[in-house]
Image (spheres, helix red, strand yellow):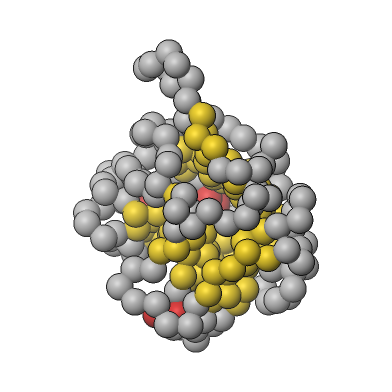
């Protein structure tokens, strides 16, 4: 199911639903899945790993270094033009290093709605999962005690299913192993009292690519593995 990268489109526009899936079983196609590093890259590395996988035999390994220039990502610009759902299995199983208080990102998405060179970033801070909007540095959830408790840490030593939805109306939904993460929801009628920073802006994300990897805004370094990635216009699930 997750072999060579595919791009599927239903024939009947405007109801077309695009989907990209990749499990790296036929290797790493660096043309379809290029590396990405904004501004600089020193020390980060992407490689195909045949020693661990969620399914099959291969996964993508990202060794991220400390400091901003230690960042490196790998991903695709084949994404739906409307609602975007992203699902990946990820693992810190070998590194056994949980998210710390430091701010890091493990998914980054160029966002034309914010302006040239700006991103929506998915990562961690205060030991929990969070979103970060680069143009105003807003976080989802707010990093207050209540906001922190409304999110979750990223499990270690296991493959974890992580999925999120960016709606055309600016809404956000997030699931961890198919369970909704209350703090990582916003808009679309969702009630999240810890989304004040995120909802202060009327920006509706218009992402142009999705990249998986590592970026640190301090000294933290870590290793992530990614497998069974799907990017779709509808909910995928685990």
Seen in the picture, residue 238 relative to 11 is either above or below; the reply is below
Q: Which residue is found at the position 39% from the left and 68% from the top?
A: 37
Tell me: 206 left or right of 57. Answer: left
Residue 150: percent from left, percent from top = 59, 55
Task: Tell me which corner region of the image, top left, top right, bottom left or bottom right, holds residue 51.
Answer: bottom right
Residue 29: percent from left, percent from top = 53, 53
Q: Quadrant of the N terminus?
A: top right
Residue 221: percent from left, percent from top = 56, 81
Tell which of 39 and 1 is nearer to you.
Answer: 1
Task: Tell me which corner region of the image, top left, top right, bottom left or bottom right, holds residue 70.
Answer: bottom left
Tell which of 93 and 31 is nearer to you.
Answer: 31
Seen in the picture, residue 177 relative to 42 is either above or below; the reply is above
Tell me: 117 left or right of 53. Answer: left
Q: Quadrant of the C terminus?
A: top right
Give the residue furthest to the left: 115
Q: Which residue is found at the position 40% from the left and 47% from the top?
A: 77
Instruction: Using the rendered image of the protein, determine whether residue 197 is visible from the camera's viewpoint.
Output: no
Q: Which residue is found at the position 34% from the left and 46% from the top?
A: 208
Residue 128: percent from left, percent from top = 59, 65
Instruction: Using the rendered image of the protein, determine whether residue 86 is visible from the camera's viewpoint.
Output: yes
């Amino acid at each position: 199911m997750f072999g060579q990268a595919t791009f599927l489109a239903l024939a009947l526009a405007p109801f077309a639903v695009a989907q990209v899936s990749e499990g790296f079983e036929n290797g790493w196609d660096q043309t379809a899945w290029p590396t990405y590093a904004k501004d600089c890259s020193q020390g980060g590395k992407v490689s195909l790993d045949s020693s661990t996988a969620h399914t099959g035999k291969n996964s993508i390994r990202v060794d991220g270094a400390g400091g901003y220039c230690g960042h490196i990502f790998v991903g695709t610009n084949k994404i739906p033009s409307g609602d975007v759902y992203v699902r990946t299995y990820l693992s810190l199983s070998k590194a056994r290093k949980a998210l710390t208080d430091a701010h890091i990102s493990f998914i980054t998405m160029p966002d034309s709605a914010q302006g040239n060179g700006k991103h929506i970033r998915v990562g961690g801070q205060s030991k929990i999962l969070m979103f970060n909007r680069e143009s105003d540095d807003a976080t989802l959830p707010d990093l207050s005690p209540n906001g922190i408790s409304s999110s979750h840490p990223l499990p270690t030593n296991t493959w974890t299913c992580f999925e999120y939805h960016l709606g055309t109306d600016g809404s956000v939904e997030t699931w961890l192993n198919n369970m909704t993460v209350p703090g990582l929801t916003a808009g679309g009628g969702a009630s999240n009292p810890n989304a004040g920073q995120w909802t202060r802006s009327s920006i509706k994300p218009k992402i142009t690519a999705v990249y998986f990897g590592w970026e640190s805004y301090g000294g933290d370094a870590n290793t992530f593995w990614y497998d069974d990635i799907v990017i779709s216009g509808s909910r995928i699930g685990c």
